[in-house]
Amino acid sequence: MKRDQGYNTKQKENLLTYLIENKEKHTNVQEISAYLSAKGTPVGVATIYRQLDRLVEQGTVRKSAFDGKTCACFQYIDEEQDCHSHFHLKCLSCGKLIHLTCDHLAEISSHIAEHHGFTIDSSQTVFYGICAECSGQDQSENDGIIAENSGSLT
């Protein structure tokens, strides 16, 4: 667990524990607040944002604001996890955010860099549409999905 030199409170420890336990997903302040309240350590939303901003500054947490309409998402940065190596899909119906590793998109990214002199930051690249669950498709048709994250991001 990454630590800073600052003062560690039980609230901060619970916040970090939640982020570590949910490192495979992007989470928002409302989900964190509900978790902390359920743990018996309710924390104000402003305090959660402050703590998250400090963790982002320290490089412990990644902040993503994909579309400017929904609230920011946060994710614990695990040394083994590389969110820069895959793209994201966001369901416009349920808000699910899906991490996607796809050779075809990697080829497109390489083509754009090589032929157009532009480097794509896949960690900030989001494709919007409707997920298989919302459209009623069979999940097995979605090769390349490495993690699904439930929960509305609104």
Image (cartoon, rainbow, N blue to C red):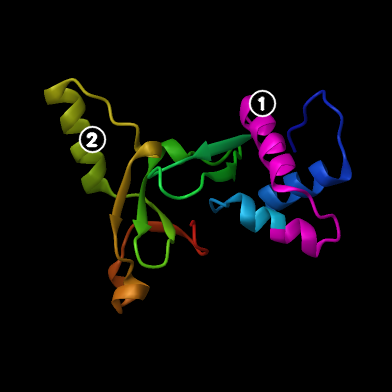
Amino acid type for the residue under numbered disc 1 = Gln
Q: Can you see residue 22?
A: no
Magenta stretch in the rendered image = 34-60
State the residue in front, 92 or 113. Answer: 92
- Residue 52 falls left or right of residue 151: right
Q: How crowded is mark 1: few (under 14 residues within 10 Å), some or many (20 or more)?
A: few
Amino acid type for the residue under numbered disc 2 = Ser
Residue 121 % position (x, y): 34, 32
- Residue 42 falls left or right of residue 54: right
Question: Up-down: is 6 above or below 102?
Answer: above
Residue 145 % position (x, y): 38, 58
State the residue in front, 15 or 84. Answer: 15
> Which residue is the site of mark 2?
109
- In 3D space, how far apart are the residues under numbered discs 1 and 2 (Cα atoms)? 29 Å
> Which residue is the site of mark 1?
58
Residue found 48% across the figure and 57% down from its top: 154
